[in-house]
Amino acid sequence: MDYVPYLEYVVYGLSGAILLGASIFAVRKLILWKGVYPSPESLRIQAAREHGWWRGIPNLKRTANSSFDTWRTGLTIVILLGVTAGFGFVISTFFGSISWESVDIVWQVHAAIVGLSFVVIVFLMDYVTRSNHVDSVLERFVEKSFVKPVLYFSLLGTVAIGFSYLYSNYLPVGLGADYAVSYFVITVLGILAVYYSILRLILDTSPDEYAYSLLKKHITRKIESDAKVHKSNKVIRDQLSDEIDLVNFRYGFGPSESDCITIDDLDKKQYVSDIKPRQYADALYQLFETLQKAEGESSIVGEETTVRSEVRLNQDAEQYSIIVDTSQDLTDIDLESVKEELDQCILTSSSPPWPPHLEDPYEFVDYLERKGVNTVRNGEFGSFSEFMNNYGDVMMHVLTELEQQDSLFQYGRYFDLESPFYNLERIFLSMFSECLQERDREQALETAKVLNSVTNYSLNNNLQPPFRNFIYIYSGFVFELCSRKSELPEVFVVGIIDELAQSLNIVFTDAVQKDCDNFDTFDINRMREEGYSFSLLEEIHKMLKYALDVKDARTFIRIWEIPSISRDQSRIEIGDKIEGEINQLLFSAASLSYSVAKQDQQHKEEFEKIYDRKLKRFFRELHDMSDIYFAIQNSNQNPPRWTKWETQEHDVIQGSHGRPVFLDNEITEFYCFLGIYCVYYSEFDNENPIKEKSISESDFQSLRFTVQEIIRAKPLFDLEEYMDEEDLEEHAEQFLEYHEEIMEPKDTKSA
């Protein structure tokens, strides 16, 4: 009978193995249910292993907090019951047993307190819901006050105390009246805690601070989530073959339904939670070969076969469901095997793997905007300063978080999607506009000061997309001032414009230096896309236009003075090229002011101020001015695009629509106009100041025709230094002779 113990060991072993297998199966299913492949092939596991497991600790903490929020009411009631039991044990141990006769009074008082508490809490909650706080803040704040679990616990206590009193003879020996009294005490303390929380919501400013805190937490999670998506895409990119392209983030409109495979085609859930990169890459290559084969069998010659990967972790199928985009119509192509392969390597879930902290962050932004506008309307400077400090703190929080995620700026389309600012920048414009409406200069300058601080921070820390957004806000400020010019006192507008121009002048100098440090060579396309100084020049272009719209020479001149660089910067190749772009922009702006002044008498008066204070000094030498003009004419890039108005009352500020054109004719005429004055002012000692230039015969004939038209029409020649008709013709002829001398011979041109 010695075999019996061994048989027992076998049974134990089999039982353990079955239990272990069942546990592994259950854990595997649980992990799959949570949206992760329990395999080394998992993209989330690979990304975590590559970037450090310790980075997942905050996620575990958030998961724990999220689980507690989900089960908050039940867990709180369980905890309160445990505290009640512990306190009852303390009473019975240290204070002696309490008789059941006294529980009758405890039960009545408990029921009265609970009933009264219902009335008071309902009244307080009604007051809170009618307040001006954002709904999500109220919901979360009320959650933190534990109103629901305390009320449930109190009602349960009324029933439990009454039942224990009525059936005390049937209760176990160890369950005495001490626990009923303990329940009563814990209930009273819980209700007092709820009263305190709700009264704090009503009387204190903590909900606003809580709103800022929630928004900052959401922004942090948003940026971290996008960074994780970008890093996981790198893992996918390493697995893809050369024939497959990877789209980090879709910009603009996606492909049509007939040339792509979507999450819906695979009958998946809403969110992409995990991917097997190797298997996914094989599926895409299989699709590529299938498309090539289909193209070879077709008699129609189409474009080159392309397959683009569109899938990414945390992808929401309701917003963008495309997984793979192709160059061909997939309607008549058998893709069952490809879809089956994709179905096996893409895991989806009903909830996002990295859920946002707030369901609707724009609700918070709207709330902050309303609050800021109301502080201006109510004339509360102290509240306004506090609001701007808090608002500036939120903006700086976004920039600080972005600074820690440099990878997001390696591709430019991140900010073309849902920006992590969630339109927070628009509050600058709303506040500034309201300050102008209330004619509060100090608050307007305070708003501009906060804008200047975040602009400088983004510039100093190489955050180019936010910098571009902030500079756009500056042009919005100038637009608001110009559009309200007729309503506001001149000294009010002048003071604000001067402050804005001074701040932007410093920013521009720093932006040029940043570009000199960042770029080794000058690439016009890259500079327009990534250059800090070019972002500013683009908005300065708009500001100059706004000033011309309202016939404001002084504002035009102050904006004109913003773009300037130091001598040291001009000696660097990048700085020298930027200086050339500045001169071309200013020359085009001056050409536009000249063109407008010819058509409008009031503009003519403003042009005289511009000419007297800037143009005749800035463009005094024909040699320097010709450098700018020929650079514009010879540039591969078109000159700055402006808007030529079809009506006298024009354009953006006045609300009428113009047509976009290039200033080719206006620039040429302005060059001839100023060139004649340069000849009039200067002494060249019979030496041609533009002898190093060259011009084609057709361009020379264009200049000749333009000069003849100027002599005939004599536009704007009644300036400070009046030129009579004889002087005009003499210096116009001299201007043409200089250009005729540099005209290319016909044979050179034909060669």
Image (cartoon, rainbow, N blue to C red):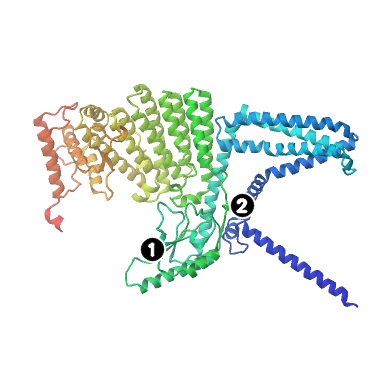
Identified at 82% across, 41% down, the residue is 85
Q: For the residue marked with disc 1, what is the amino acid?
A: Ser
Dividing the picture into quarters, in which one does residue 142 lie? top right
> Dot 1 corresponds to which residue?
327
Q: Residue furthest front?
A: 166
Residue 28: percent from left, percent from top:
66, 62
Identified at 58% across, 60% down, the residue is 46
Viewer-proximal residue among 543 and 125: 125
Q: For the residue marked with disc 2, what is the amino acid?
A: Arg
Q: Residues within 10 Å of mark 2 (few under 14, many from 20)?
A: few
Identified at 40% across, 43% down, the residue is 532
Viewer-proximal residue among 557 and 311: 311
Disc tally is 2
Helix, strand or loop under label 2: helix
Helix, strand or loop under label 1: loop
* Residue 360 in the image: above or below residue 430: below
Residues at marks 1 and 2, CA–CA distance in whole angstroms: 39 Å
User: Upstream in the sequence, badge 1 or badge 2?
Assistant: 2
Q: Mark on residue 55?
A: 2
Q: Is residue 448 visible?
A: no
Left or right: 357 with respect to 2?
left
Residue 559: percent from left, percent from top:
33, 33
